[in-house]
Amino acid sequence: MADAQPILQVKDISKRFGGLVAVDQVSLEVHSGEVVGLLGDNGAGKSTLIKMISGVYQPDGGEVFFNGSVVHFSTPLEARTLGIETIYQDLALCENLDATANIFLGREPMRRRLGIFRTIDRGLMLTESRQVLEQLDIEIPNLRRPIRQMSGGQRQAVSIARAVYWNAHLMIMDEPTAALSLPEQFKVLDLVRALRERGVPVLIISHNLQEVFAVADRIVVMRRGRKVGERAKSETNDNEIVSMIVGAEEIKQV
């Protein structure tokens, strides 16, 4: 990569749950403007790994560097404060609130009325929400509609717009296209490309090989808690990646 110092660097990170080693001395890097696909079967340790990066779990060994400095996150909020935004499958959106309220959730702008009373500046929230959605080429006709009435793709778009608005330095996405229709899957992948163009690196977990090959620059494969391979997309193919995922001894080329 042209950028010598990675945004994220994980060195020999490990996590145990009792006698189970969920992640075993895994190392990886993510650079500015890069999309890295993280692949592996269920139980490979992918979700545990990203939860350590995002502050949900604390590692039992190894180190996490962010922008060149060692970081120790006790909570996901600490990771978000530094600019690590994670979008899980459940999206963590408040379904009774509209898109603007979700984008500003917990960080609502305030204004004074009559010089005394402080109220939420909903007009500013609406204006700012429209601007960030337009920057990402996202069209949601009615931003005042509750999230529960939106499609899966629109919900993903709101989550991504929220992260971009609050100046994400790293985006982690866990199965972002799961349960979406095909057109919505394509739109989410377009948003991943838009993030890369803005210089925001993305670490994406997916079971869909075609999806990863469509957007990733590099692919990291995990199996049984360990990193078993890493390839530039241009130097591999789906047969080799599948072989690493399942642990095949021989790689059969088409």
Image (tube, grey):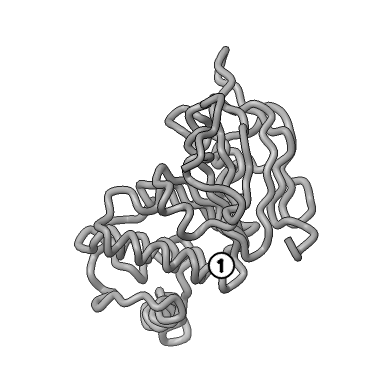
Neighbor class of circle 1 (other Cα within 10 Å; few <14, some 14-19, many 20+) is some
Residue behind mark 1: 196
The residue lying toward the viewer, choosing from 59 and 206, is 206
Task: Tell me if residue 46 comes above or below residue 92 in the rendering.
Answer: above
Locate residue 118: give its quadrant.
bottom left
Residue 96 visible from this viewpoint? no
**Which residue is found at the position 47% from the left and 64% from the top?**
192
Instruction: Give the percent coordinates (x, y) of residue 75.
Output: 58, 43
Locate the N terminus and report the quarter of the image it occupies.
bottom right
- In screen coordinates, is 1 left or right of 119? right
The outermost residue toward the left is 149
- Tag 1, which secondary structure? helix
The residue lying toward the viewer, choosing from 223 and 55, is 223
The outermost residue toward the bottom is 114
Residue 149 visible from this viewpoint? yes
Task: Tell me if residue 94 comes above or below residue 21 in the rendering.
Answer: below
**Which residue is found at the position 44% from the left and 63% from the top?**
160
The residue lying toward the viewer, choosing from 15 and 166, is 15
The residue lying toward the viewer, choosing from 70 and 227, is 227
Task: Tell me if residue 136 comes above or below residue 75 in the rendering.
Answer: below
The outermost residue toward the top is 19
Amino acid at dot 1: Arg
Total numbered labels: 1
Instruction: Give the percent coordinates (x, y) of residue 190.
Output: 42, 68
- In screen coordinates, is 57 left or right of 182? right
Instruction: Give the percent coordinates (x, y) of residue 29.
Output: 69, 49
**Which residue is found at the position 52% from the left and 26% from the top?**
247
**Which residue is found at the position 59% from the left and 56% from the top?**
234
Instruction: Give the percent coordinates (x, y) of residue 166.
Output: 54, 67
